[in-house]
Amino acid sequence: MHSLLLGSLVATGGVVAFLHAALPTHWLPFVLAGRGQRWGRGKTLTVAALAGTGHVLFTIALGVLVAAFGVAVDRATGEVFPWIAAGVLAAFGLYYLSRQALGRGHGHAHFGHVHDHGEDETLLPAQVSDGYPAKGRSDRAVILGLFAALTFSPCEAYLPVFVAGVRAGWTGFAFLSAVLALSTVAGMMLLTWLTLLGLERLPLARLERYEHGVLGAVLLTLAVAVLLLES
């Protein structure tokens, strides 16, 4: 694989993962749970890191399946594969752009706030009082709930990046997985920490309004790069 393309994949993967981590559903629930359970800042960040790690590992597990399929297709199609990879990237890019044009929200159902069609709905696992989980819920139950909810909602936007990196082999896959892990967990912890410091007025929630548009543009750009550098 062309080194310039690999660099583009790394940069694209970092942007996609960080944008996904910046969604309020990836950090706000930990702030709410931490306040409701009266956790210290360190424990709240630790729980966020734990859930983020589960989120990343589940996405990588799906990525292994996607990459293995891509390797098989690459062997069968040879020189045609870059066009297939670019087509997958373009299809995802157009999908996200169409959702942005239609004004559809992200719609992830994690513990926290779900933004869909511009409306917010609180979906905390425990009974909620004044925006915080009700007292009496054990720390273990809250932590397991947060972990399970985030883990089993993978970063689907990163899967096309794994497809585009098939020709870099499993070494490239490992590198892209490391980028996913670093960008996601670091992004979640950074935004959780900023909110815990009292910077709730930062317009972070607005990122969700434009996430699909940005992701679509990034994936379409990567599709063009694949065609120019690999075909």
Image (cartoon, rainbow, N blue to C red):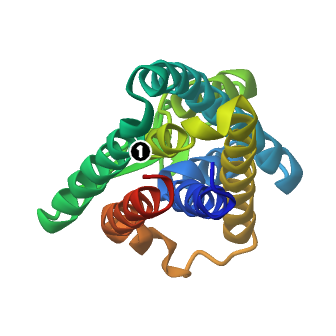
User: In front here: 112 or 79?
Assistant: 79
User: In front here: 84 or 97?
Assistant: 84
Give coordinates of residue 160: x percent, y percent: 44, 42
Q: Quadrant of residue 137?
A: top right
Q: Which residue is found at the position 36% from the left and 38% from the top?
A: 80
**Relative to 166, 48 lies left or right:** right
Q: Which residue is found at the position 38% from the left and 57% from the top?
A: 223
In the image, residue 166 above or below residue 24: above
SS at badge 1 = helix
**Relative to 224, 99 lies left or right:** left
Looking at the image, can residue 218 be seen? yes
In the image, residue 211 above or below residue 198: above
Q: Which residue is found at the position 84% from the left and 44% from the top?
A: 43
**Residue that label 1 marks:** 82
Give coordinates of residue 207: x percent, y percent: 43, 70
Looking at the image, can residue 123 be seen? no
User: In front here: 147 or 52?
Assistant: 52
Give coordinates of residue 13: x percent, y percent: 58, 55
Q: Which residue is found at the position 44% from the left and 31% from the top?
A: 78
